[in-house]
Image (spheres, rainbow, N blue to C red):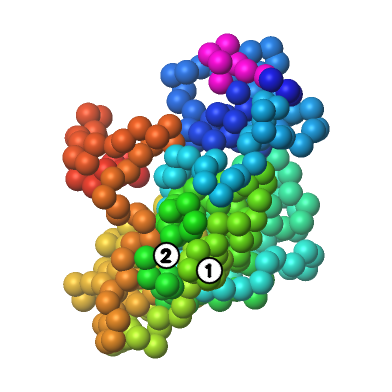
Amino acid sequence: VPSWKDPDGDGCAEYANFKWCTSTGGFGVGWHEEWGNFGGAPNAAKACCYCGGGAGVAATSGAGGIEAPTATGSVRTPQQAIRPASTGLGGGAANAAGGERFTWNKCKCKKKWEMEGVGKCTDSCCNLDDDAFGEWCMVADESCEEADWGYCKPKGLEATACQNSPAGWVDAEGDNCGDYGMGAYCTAAGDYGSGWNKSWGTFAIFANQGHTAITACCNCGGGIDASDQCKDKADWKDKDGDACATYSNSAWCDITGGYGVGWHEEWGKFADAANKGMSAVEACCACGGGDYSTVPRPEGDGSQVRSRSTLLGCECKKDWLDEITGMPCHDYCCSPDD
């Protein structure tokens, strides 16, 4: 809605850039519950395209919408957003419509399903809640997934021990692969993610060093296969009998040692399944471990940087203590309550 602002003077651009809302009109990751409900009549959910409302007119600069990107001014601030989405996956084609679909754990998706309070899906895999990790489904056999849902594996996409290339790549505005992942700007299949706003244009606009994120970043479907430069620890299996190949093929981990889209938090931590004094993070190349021969061990995809900021651009403390759990954090951003 042209010239719309809420009672505090914030317009649709602020709601989009700071992720205060979702495309379904809900509260986004940047919104604090202490702020209450969306204000205004109409409120952002009715007035803003990004929040699921709007007047059906393309936003233009100065019209109360999201400004188009320019070569010098970033509309994607602040850079840090949501959570790391790097899956350590190599390239692949975008999802094809129709046909049977499966999760990363090779479990068949239900063709039609519904989740109360979220919505209905009629084509196996949907992203009804704008999940940063992409499409998911309710599974036909819960004993297969060990859960009633799972993230969908894009057709034709295979997991690899991927490494970003060129090393240290950033786009034309200085955003690195970690920023693309944490902002959900892209998907592992090389598509635009739920955090990418159409008004920014294409990935190509932000190309640098002859690359865009979908050619340079593992979490965007690019990067290079580093498996020929690393060897998994010989004969290692976790305490449940799962080998490095399973961790890689099922996307249980990523190249930085983080949890992949195939891992369910209900399963606990990698360390819980350690064997022979090692977890997958130490034993498996695809999980950031193993034995590297000719290249340095890959660094995190922006998950550890010199400083971190909230969605509102506020600088995070490097060392802090969670008063509720009593757990300390010494690297800016942590999740003490998992």
**Picture residue at 40% right of the left edge, 81% below the top:** 226
- Tags 1 and 2 touching, CB below 8 Å: yes
Q: Which residue is mark 1?
A: 211
- Cα–Cα gap, marks 1 and 2: 8 Å
- Of helix, strand and loop, which one carries label 2? loop
> Which residues are the magenta region?
4-10
- Magenta span contains residue 7: yes
Binning the other alpha carbons within 10 Å of mark 1 as few (below 14), some (14 to 19) or many (20 upward) gives: many
Instruction: Give the residue type at disc 2.
Output: Trp
Residue 78 against residue 268 in the figure, above or below: above
Mark positioned earlier in the residue sequence (1 or 2): 2
Question: Quadrant of the image for the C terminus?
Answer: top left
SS assignment for the magenta stretch, majority: loop
Q: Position of residue 294 (x, y in %)?
A: 28, 86
Secondary element under disc 1, as helix, strand or loop, is loop
- Residue 279 position, x and y percent, is 27, 69
Q: Is residue 181 above or below residue 159?
A: above
Amino acid at dot 1: His
Name the image quarter holding the N terminus. top right
- Please say if 230 is above or below 164: below
What residue do we see at 55% from left, 57% from top? 206
Q: Position of residue 173 (x, y in %)?
A: 47, 52
The residue that appears at 72% across and 58% down in the rendered structure is 124
| Residue 63 as seen in the image, left or right of residue 244 | right
Residue in the image at 56% along x and 49% along y: 71
Hey, which quadrant is residue 3 in on the image?
top right
Q: Nearer the viewer, residue 173 or 101?
A: 173
Q: Which residue is mark 2?
A: 169
